[in-house]
Amino acid sequence: MNLRSDTAAARRQPRARKNHKAEPVSPAGNKRPAGLNRSVSRALDLLLDIAHSPHPQSFVDLQHQHRVPKGTLHKLLFTLEALHFIRRDQETGKYSVGLAALEVAAAGAASPADLPFLLKPILEKLVEENNETCHLGILQGGEEIILKRLDPLEQVVRLAPTVGRRHPAYASSGGLASMALSMTDADLAAFPEVLPQLTENTIKSREELRERLAEVRAKGYSLDMEEAYIGVRCVGVAVEVPNWPVVHISFSLPLQRAPVERLRALAKPLLTAAKEIEKILSVTPRA
């Protein structure tokens, strides 16, 4: 055997390339083009993960999913939070979508049918922080239409109203809030002097409705004291944005945990959420 010739032949064999970088892939396993900025890619992957998750994500969840070093992950999350693309719950430390991300999502043209999708993160935040059923609705003529309903997972007592439900707007907190923003005296003149009743507590006359709407305008929110359903009380606020139907959001509570003080306290987070909704719809072109 000629050891010299064998060694020379071995040297001529092509060597495996060292430090060869694999093609970048997304967390879903899709190949990505070379040349991407690693920090930007990681930040956007985190944002998409948080946006697609049905529940807020913890630091440990995100690290396990993305396998990013703790120090790097902390900086990425801090940056996204500081720029309002994500928000961190002060009590749980978990992350959910922030207002800036919603503004980006809202930049495309949308229609009223897209409202449940556009405003879902805001509704989820309301339910998560207040542990009560939340409704999103609009007016159509003199009726309220429920577009979306979110129930808290922990609540044992659930309420009957469902998506697509219609009933007279004057019999619900959200409907009254929307009517207070949008209806003129001429609109009210079209209502009958005696209004159909849903319960014994429903507003009974056009004049009573007029007085009630003036009260809602003064307070900025409305209450439903078993006026649509016996055993259910609600508090609602409305948002008016040019080129959009008046939108209302409300909390619905069973009577046993709905003293007036509780309803008034729940008006505060609804009013805060209404400002976020106004900001989102203001930058959303109407299709």
Image (cartoon, rainbow, N blue to C red):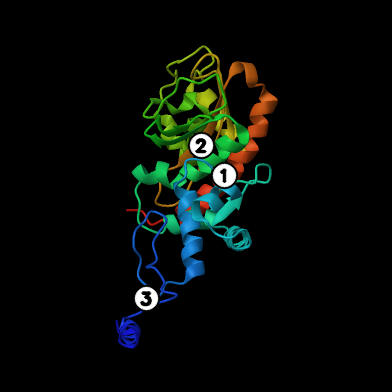
Q: Which mark is residue 16?
A: 3
How much space separates mark 1 and mark 2, taking CA atoms?
9 Å
Mark 2 = which residue? 249
The mark that comes first in sequence, 1 or 3, is 3
Q: Amino acid at mark 1?
A: Ala
| Residue 252 screen position, x and y as percent | 54, 26
- Graded by Cα atoms within 10 Å as few (under 14), some (14 to 19) or many (20 or more), the crowding at tag 3 reads few
Q: Residue at x 48, y 46 (%)?
A: 240
| Residue 86 screen position, x and y as percent | 56, 54
Q: Is residue 59 above or below residue 68?
A: above
Q: Nearer the viewer, residue 262 or 104?
A: 104
How much space separates mark 1 and mark 3, taking CA atoms?
59 Å
Q: Amino acid at mark 3?
A: Ala
The total number of labels drawn is 3
In the rendered structure, the answer to whether residue 173 lies left or right of residue 242 reads right
Q: Residue at x 35, y 70 (%)?
A: 33
Q: Nearer the viewer, residue 54 or 285?
A: 54
| Residue 278 screen position, x and y as percent | 51, 50
Q: Amino acid at mark 2?
A: Ile
For residue 213, say whether it is visible.
yes
Q: Nearer the viewer, mark 1 or mark 3?
A: 3
The mark that comes first in sequence, 2 or 3, is 3
In the rendered structure, the answer to whether residue 96 lies left or right of residue 284 reads right
- For numbered disc 2, what is the local secondary structure? strand
Q: Residue at x 37, y 45 (%)?
A: 114
Q: Residue at x 40, y 48 (%)?
A: 244
Mark 1 = which residue? 273
